Image (cartoon, rainbow, N blue to C red):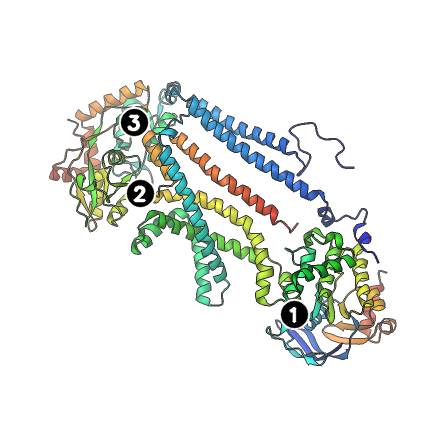
Amino acid sequence: MTTAKRHSNPFVGDGAGHTSPLKAAINYLLVCLLVIALFWVSLAMLGYTFDFSFVSQYRMRIAQGFLLTIEISAASLVASLALGTLVAAGRGSRILPLRYLCDLYVKLIRGTPLIMQIYLFFYIIGTAWGITDRVVAGILILSTFEAAYIAEIIRGSLLSIDETQRDAARAVGLTHAQTVRLVILPQMVARTLPALTGQFASIIKDSSLLSIIAVIEITQTMREISASNFKLFECYFLLGVLYLALTLPVAAIGRHFERRFDYAH
Amino acid sequence: MCHHNLADACDGKRTKEEDMTNSNSRSRTVRRARGHVASTLFVLLALASLVCASALTACAGSSSDSSSSASKSASGSSSKKTLVVAMELAYPPFETKTDSGEPDGVSVQFIKDFGEAYGYDVVIQNTAWDGLIPSLVTGQADCVISSMTITDERAQTVDFSEPYAVAQLAILANANSNISSIDDLNQPGKTVAVKTGSTGDTYATNNLTNATIVRLADESACVTEVSQGKADGFLYDQLTIYREQKSNSGTTKAVYIAFQDPEKWGIAVQKGNTELLGQLNEFIETSKTDGEYDKLTDKYLSEEKAAFDELGFKWFFDLS
Amino acid sequence: MRIELADLCKKFDGTSVLKGLDFDDDVTTLAIIGPSGGGKSTLLRILGGLTAPTSGTVRVDGETVSYDEATLPAYRAKLGFVFQQGGLFQHLSAVENIAMPLREVHGVEASAAEQTARELLDRFGLAEDAEKRPAQLSGGQQQRVAIARAVAGRPRLLLLDEPTSALDPAYTNDVLDMIDDLREDGMRFVIVTHEMGFARNACEKCAFLSQGRLLEYGESSKLFAHPSTPELRAFLDKLLEWR
């Protein structure tokens, strides 16, 4: 009754989710090659050939910048998770000034661009309060920015838990503390982890903006290199590859979490 | 009583939930998982191989084929040819905007006058500093006039006209610092702010090896760093330092002692565009004598000329 | 089990849902029937300690139920409650759904709790589904696991809030059969239901609630055969319309 005939066309799948991994990989590679070919042809039309010889010359700086990007992203992830959780909790607080402070924070931070926040926080608040180390300031600013988004993710996942789950917890005799520990938190973790992974990928990319206060992560490194060798395209292309090397694994982890916690279907 | 038979036997009435209990679901998920991992690897491999391939095959450099597309717009056959000029409109009074957002300034006026004299329709393209030379290389612009210093490094990628103006680097220092010469900046523990890619950047990178160099994209950020004391000095041209020091008189001071040979500004064109280059050089030459430079000075730089005369600096258009 | 209700009232945002219920009787198997919005679920939730009444008292086996969160968990632990849908913990497997309350609320040791859970599932033909999560079970299976969970702690009373109303008709009988099974074992229960056949034949007594008032109460067979109030008569007539 089901597929008696397997499709012999290598480009056609068998319907949602039944494609063999070999077929999937070959077709994916084909699409990637097509995109690469598009760029190659465009470059040829402009009479431009890529010259990546600078990579070996600047490999130390590139490696250092790449490492700093990873460090900043990791530190910001931890800090923004902590702050985001506090803010999410604060938004449900009964102490009104606290609740409204958290609410205002989320609205302002989510409603303004990061580039503006970096300039204002570094040159005004950072200077006034004596935070002179650019990397430290950069991590603080980035964490403050991302925490607002994480707070919303956490709040959203908390709200998405069906009221009946809480009802059922009470009905079996669990106390409030037990309900939170055994029912609410596990379900929240399941809901937030995939979204948090996405947020981590955002942190990695957003860290590139810290270049405007001369934090010498990988984007700033590439800007400096391209300013002296004028190979703008090669530099930014390599920059893209380096970011992909970070974000693609994160995306894969996100998908893994999605599958692992996908018990709502 | 045995109930599980009843629960599962509902021919023709399989609900969505019943389908999910299909024992194939787990293996399907695993297969999908393997497919995703494989595809991610392939993307990375493909990109990596592209980068390697380009690095291996690049020998002739990037400028060899550019002459074919050189005169795309500068030698069109219609009555009035278009001259696409790229500049960064963030450098008053040379390259700036009017209140209504139109390009204006010394360079703008200069190139427009050139266009009139040689029959070009001038189109100004506001481009970020980093992108000026790349826009010439790709043929997006025909020339770049943006207070750009002629350097050997840049001359490898583009062709420069004869110098049309001359400038000198100066230091904007924090008012409380003890900076009175360039050597004071070249000490361990000192921070020097520069605009990325400017001649100040090049000078600092090559010569101020003991200091920490902070490269920023905006001139205003550099000035802020100095006035806040985050940087001890900002290397930029005399005129800008003069103006910035005046607007930040409480927190900054200017050091004008020359520490290098004067810089010569040139108009950049795509390598091999000899026709346009010849025309530009002709125009620059005549401007020295026919009053073009005087006109520009009077219109845009009268105050500055007075200040320069007072301080004893060589004037921009004094190309002697 | 003796249940006494004295002038029980419940208001939600100014709207009166229960308007002074009085009741005093022993309960073995009781069906609560009536038109929608009549207050049946609210009454059941009050009995189960999930909602506090606005005024009036509830006494179970001579003890007044005090509706404060300090004592309610203990009260609820001695009851079993089955919701209409979505009552199972989504993140736990069927066996964990049953074992977790045994461990955390009734203090049963972990391996004993799991064993009890598996035995229950086994008894009701759900052994194959023990490791499945609720989303992987059909509606009927979910409700049966929910009932198993509710009785695992040997409650003194089982409360069921329209357990079959959200089900595909094909599963309804499985669930009702299971409740009947439990009845034969001696389980006491109060069920809010629209399954009149079940109310009439499987439940000893029946209470008819309409618009927040207890209009009729008595032995099920008598109630259905000879409804005395016009409201109940109209209600039953309407039900028979589509038989």
Q: Which mark is residue B99?
A: 2
Residue C36: x %, y % from top left? 73, 66
Query: Which residue shows up at 84% across the image and 62% down it?
Result: C241
How far, Cα to Cα, is label 2 from label 1?
68 Å
Q: Which picture quadrant has residue C202?
A: bottom right
Q: Amino acid at mark 3?
A: Arg
* Mark 3 Cα shell of 10 Å, populated few (<14), some (14-19), many (≥20): some
- Judged left or right of residue B93, residue C186 is right
Residue under pointer 1: C50
How far, Cα to Cα, is label 3 from label 2?
33 Å
Subunit bearing disc 1: C
Residue C136: x %, y % from top left? 70, 51
Q: Quadrant of the C terminus of chain B?
A: top left
Residue under pointer 3: B154
Q: Amino acid at mark 2?
A: Asp
User: Is residue A89 positioned above or below B81 on the image?
Assistant: below
